[in-house]
Amino acid sequence: MLLNMGACEYKRSLNLLPTLNKFRNEGESGFCDVVLETEGRHFWVHRCVLAANSQFFYTMLNSGMRESKEKILRLPSLSCVAMENILDFFYTQEIRLTDDIIVDILEASSFLLLEPLKKTCIEILLSKISLENCFSTKRLAMEYNTEELLERVEDFMKKNFLRIVKKSKEFLELSLKELCELMSNQDIRVLEEIQVYYAAIKWVKHDVNSRSKQLPVLIKRLNLKAISSDFWNEELENEPLLHDGVYRSIIFNKCNDKEKQNDLTISLYRERPSTKVHNVLVGIGTGKCYRAFCYDTEDGDTYILPNLPTIQAFPNTVVVDKKLYILGGESQRNINYDPVNSLRVFPFEVERTDSGLHAGWVRKPSFREVRRDIAVVAHDQKIYVVGGWMSGAVGSVECYDSVSSTWSLVAPLCIPRSQLAAISTTNCILAIGGSTDQVVGTTTVEQYDPSTNSWSFLPPMKTRRLFGNVIFVHDKVYVLGGYDNAFDRISNCESYDPSTKEWSTIPPLPDLLHTNQSVVTLNNEIIAITGSPEIYCKAAWYNSHANVWEKVQNFRLNFNIAGYRLCCLQVKKYFIQELPKATASDIAAANVNSFPKQEHFVEESHALVGDLGLALSEDEQDDDSDSDEWF
């Protein structure tokens, strides 16, 4: 209250709500003029307070209908607990939303048209979606028509289907209709359709006496053709629930045409997206860029990989058994950018747990000889580090067995070289080009035969080059771009036919390649990423039939990847979807050297294999020895 007293003003707080709340507790003697009844309990309140807080009460009390004149208003659909807390909220503008009353308050706020309070309840429920309550939360969302909550909980159920089946008690109590709806959702994330079948069997066996007769309905919800006949034959023999002959008819599609047309529950036999194998393009940053990404070439989505450790910048990359390895590179912890002999791996086939996504750059044993400008190649589940430079050209070759996680020395190069390229063919490894003095390229080509552990010379290239990009596809080796010497890049290309042992010139690249891993094979086609990381990048593919380079039309990457070392691999969509997706702002931050969202990758403590060589000082080695294995 504001009183004008001459030239002075006096302001006084009337404390209306506390006063009205005090009157409410006095009942009719406190000027209360209406009673709310729910579950047999009476609450004295003021009509004006009800109308001021709720559109529902305002309409009721102002309608002129019978209820507006009655002394007692009965609200049988609301719980006593909800009514008491809602009235406290009306009179104090404060409410404590605990887990035990949140559902009652959501129901009451929906009924009484208290949209701000309803929205707050939904926000709380959104934050509490879990394996144990996702189905009950979905029922709430459907009952109270909350689209955001329904969309979020359904998305949670799709992403966590396997964990829900494994851990959720609510899953075992689902109705047949709810389970059928879940199984029919093509977007649930599973590695293979067999996992959906096992989920149905688990649900049936929870109450086998009453649910066994419902199994045929569930079987028809499966994508039956995504499961092999061998599996079904074995399951029909070993699973007691399937001993009835009707299952063989359903599973092997023995229904007649009329039944197929009339039975709408029969599966459409579409493969679930998460079970499909996708071609992905992986990019590893170079220089001061520590970003790593994964681009799904089929869906056009970009995902974030763990940032590279600064101790291993500018590494070589290679793929073995759906695992991405980075080898060598240089340390940027000191001004000399000394080479490192580190080996780290990112296993794409990782799964989310309760504590997060267990994924990161995992250390493996380092190769023995520290050197820079090496060539790296994978052959027959093994990784070879070839040549390099350390106070002179290096000819040694080391082999990493990815199964036993051990290194061994194999036969050295005939001519020690650095800045060379290496590629795996059907039976052999080729070491191509490079330099003996770090200045001028060579035309030298050597072939390594793992069966005899020996190197031999092949016909030299037509053009000397170092840091060339090499690809083996269509039974030919393609050597693209690179440098003629330490200063001059070249765009000319040539191919080698192992059957004739002859080199042939092919058309030059439409532009220069920025790294020695700027060319990949995608669907057996050669894709070259040309340009400059500071200005632009373009994608071109080599049309071997017409012997020309053409622009890639469906390459939808919308950020510059010319400065990345690239490789391709095939991974099930299930594993790709587990990675954090890059947003437009993540991609647009071209001047940022690392990706955000690294909290998506869980770190774990393990015994470490230390980085050896010149990259680490003694202090750095001591500091790093206590760090986590995950980066």
Image (cartoon, grey):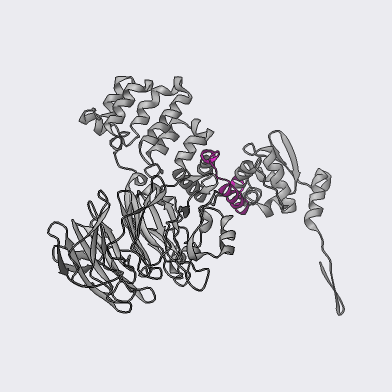
Q: Position of residue 259 (x, y in %)?
A: 25, 29
Q: Is residue 455 magenta?
A: no
**Does residue 617 sit above or below 321 in this rendering?**
below
Residue at 63% from the left image edge and 47% from the top image edge:
60
Residue at 45% from the left image edge and 35% from the top image edge:
178
Q: Nearer the viewer, residue 590 or 390?
A: 390
- First to last magenta residue range: 110-136
The answer to whether residue 477 is left or right of residue 3 is left
The answer to whether residue 449 is left or right of residue 213 is left
Q: Position of residue 102 (x, y in %)?
A: 63, 43
Residue at 45% from the left image edge and 39% from the top image edge:
162
Q: Position of residue 94 (x, y in %)?
A: 72, 52
**Does residue 619 sit above or below 451 in this rendering?**
below
In the picture, which quadrant includes the N terminus? bottom right
- The answer to whether residue 228 is visible is yes
Q: Nearer the viewer, residue 147 or 518?
A: 518
Q: How many numbered discs sit on the rendered protein?
A: 0
**Does residue 551 sit above or below 71 in this rendering?**
below
Q: Nearer the viewer, residue 275 or 409?
A: 409
Residue at 38% from the left image edge and 66% from the top image edge:
564
Q: Position of residue 207 (x, y in %)?
A: 48, 23
Q: Main secondary structure of the magenta part?
A: helix
